[in-house]
Image: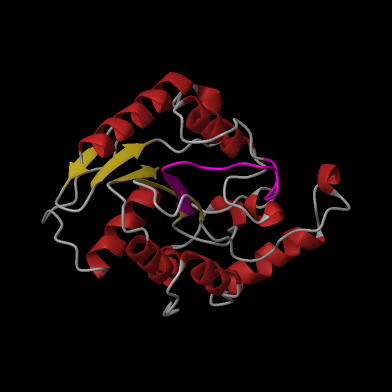
């Protein structure tokens, strides 16, 4: 398991990008880069672990699952260049957390204000399904990220996997948590002394195409995150 020693988020990003701790994930992320989709043929894939990004002074941190094989694994920025990111960043823009509604490349001019986006697992996993062991291997990066994001008041978890990863990271950081972890659901709120955990269904195509997660639902959750962080 990695032991991050970075003193800044930029230095932590460098540590993340150099990680090769999980052989299955290393093999998959590189295989995807060598066998790109036809629409991305000729592009240079990032094909490394993907660091978090956003406002260093953020009061809101969003925790997703993992980079998409042809999204963050290609672009080098989480939720960038895939349909989930299209849905998420449009909502962040409507909520005033992003300066533009799209995210297609690391150098596309996107800037986040008062928000920081990261993931439970930093490498693209086969079938978009990391194992619990891979999640746990990545946990120290999330722990250190939360330590460096000193102003965070709200953690928006995108899906149950991100919720479980965040809960374990906070416990490892010796945060006093409720004895029993509440079950994940959309609209979940778990307040405690340092921050409030808020839950949303993940903006995956499976959820957004079926209507399990709508734009209105995500807008309402982000509005609630703003309300909580303003009150903190």
Answer yes or no: is residue 186 visible. no
At 43% across and 64% down in the image, what residue appears?
135
Position in image of residue 100 (x %, y %): 60, 32
Vertical placement of residue 189 versus 3, above or below: above
Q: Quadrant of the N terminus?
A: bottom left
Magenta span of residues: 104-118
The total number of labels drawn is 0
The answer to whether one can see residue 113 in this image is yes
- Is 43 in front, or is 225? 225
Residue sitting at the far top: 216
Residue 38, horizontal then vertical, whole percent: 85, 45
36 versus 83 height, above or below: below
In percent of the image, x 46 and y 49: which residue is there? Answer: 55
Q: Residue at x 43, y 19 (%)?
A: 216
Q: How is the image coloured?
A: secondary structure
Q: Residue at x 40, y 35 (%)?
A: 201
């Amino acid at each position: 398991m990695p032991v991050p020693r970075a003193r800044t988020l930029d230095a932590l990003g460098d540590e993340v990008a150099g990680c090769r701790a999980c052989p299955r994930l290393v093999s998959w992320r590189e295989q995807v880069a060598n066998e790109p989709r036809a629409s991305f043929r000729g592009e240079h894939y990032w094909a490394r672990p993907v660091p978090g990004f956003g406002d260093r002074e953020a009061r809101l941190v969003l925790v997703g699952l993992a980079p998409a094989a042809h999204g963050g694994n290609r672009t080098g920025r989480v939720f960038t260049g895939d349909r989930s990111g299209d849905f998420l960043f449009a909502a962040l823009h409507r909520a005033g957390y992003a300066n533009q509604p799209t995210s297609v490349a690391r150098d596309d001019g996107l800037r986040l204000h008062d928000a920081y986006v990261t993931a439970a697992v930093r490498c693209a996993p086969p079938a978009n399904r990391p194992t619990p062991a891979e999640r746990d291997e990545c946990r120290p990066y999330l722990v250190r990220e939360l330590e460096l994001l000193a102003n965070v008041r709200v953690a928006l978890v995108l899906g149950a996997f991100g919720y479980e990863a965040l809960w374990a990271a906070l416990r490892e950081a010796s945060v006093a948590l409720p004895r029993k972890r509440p079950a994940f659901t959309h609209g979940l709120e778990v307040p405690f002394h340092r921050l409030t955990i808020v839950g949303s269904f993940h903006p995956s195509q499976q959820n957004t195409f079926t209507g399990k997660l709508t734009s209105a639902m995500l807008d309402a959750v982000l509005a609630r995150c703003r309300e909580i962080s303003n009150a903190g």
